[in-house]
Amino acid sequence: MTEEVDVLFLRDAFTRQGIMLCFNGPFSAELIEEIGKALRHYLEGMKESPSSVTDVFAAYIELTQNIRHYVREQGFEGANAEGTVVVSHRDGRYIVSAGNAVRQADGDALMARVDALSGLDKAALKAAYKTQLRAPREPGAKTGAGLGLIDLARKASAPLTATLKPLPDGLAFFSLRVVI
């Protein structure tokens, strides 16, 4: 027999942590779009500034699409094909966090990229964005941790933070936190 989910416990935990939205599972394009619409409507209903709505929505879209593309590219199945996204509101700021299973080497590269970006000020982030935008792209080149990650760092009100936790079979769970 499976353990019953204690919905009251979850509601109380979500309330304590300011969690407005949480999803765990496989991301399809349709699901990303529908959750994104609901998130945007919720924020607009809370009378948030248009720039806040746009930045939170953009962070949600960037993170969930990155998960979807990576999982498909890697051919992951089962639990490794799932991602998690959480949007919360605390201390007057929105936090968009997302995570998924990655190959250890990919996770290490992402951690290094996030660490490098977190040490840059707004002017340096703008310069890095322009440099990345102008960089030539090779046909068929694998993308990742490029413009989107730099743009997240530019929109964030605090440095990006990430964690990488080991999983079996040469995988790790990468999570990224963006404060808007």
Image: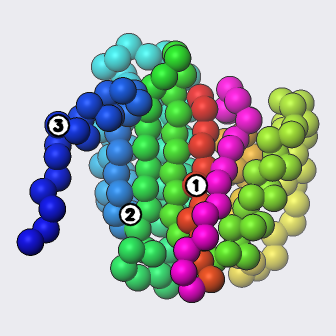
The quadrant of the image that shows the C terminus is top right
Q: Does the magenta stretch include residue 160?
A: yes
Where residue 8 appears, as percent x and y from the top left, is 17, 37
Indicate which disc, 1 or 3, sits on the residue closer to the N terminus: 3
In the depicted structure, whether residue 102 falls above or below residue 180: below
Q: Nearer the viewer, mark 1 or mark 3?
A: 3
**Label 2, residues with CA under 10 Å away: few <14, some 14-19, many ≥20:** many
Q: How far apart are marks 2 and 1 (CA)?
A: 15 Å
Q: Is residue 2 magenta?
A: no
Q: Label 2 sits on what residue type?
A: Phe
For the residue pair 156 and 4, the one nearer the viewer reads as 4
Left or right of 139: which side holds 157?
left
For the residue pair 97 and 33, the one nearer the viewer reads as 97
Q: How far apart are marks 1 and 3 (CA)?
A: 26 Å
Where residue 159 appears, as percent x and y from the top left, is 74, 35
Which residue appears at 48% of the width and 66% of the height?
A: 68
Name the residue carrying label 2: 27
Q: Give the range drawn in magenta.
A: 154-169
Q: Is mark 2 on a helix, strand or loop?
A: loop
Q: Verify CB contact (< 8 Å) between mark 3 and mark 2.
A: no
Name the residue carrying label 1: 175
**Label 3, residues with CA under 10 Å away: few <14, some 14-19, many ≥20:** few
Q: Label 3 sits on what residue type?
A: Leu
Name the residue carrying label 3: 8
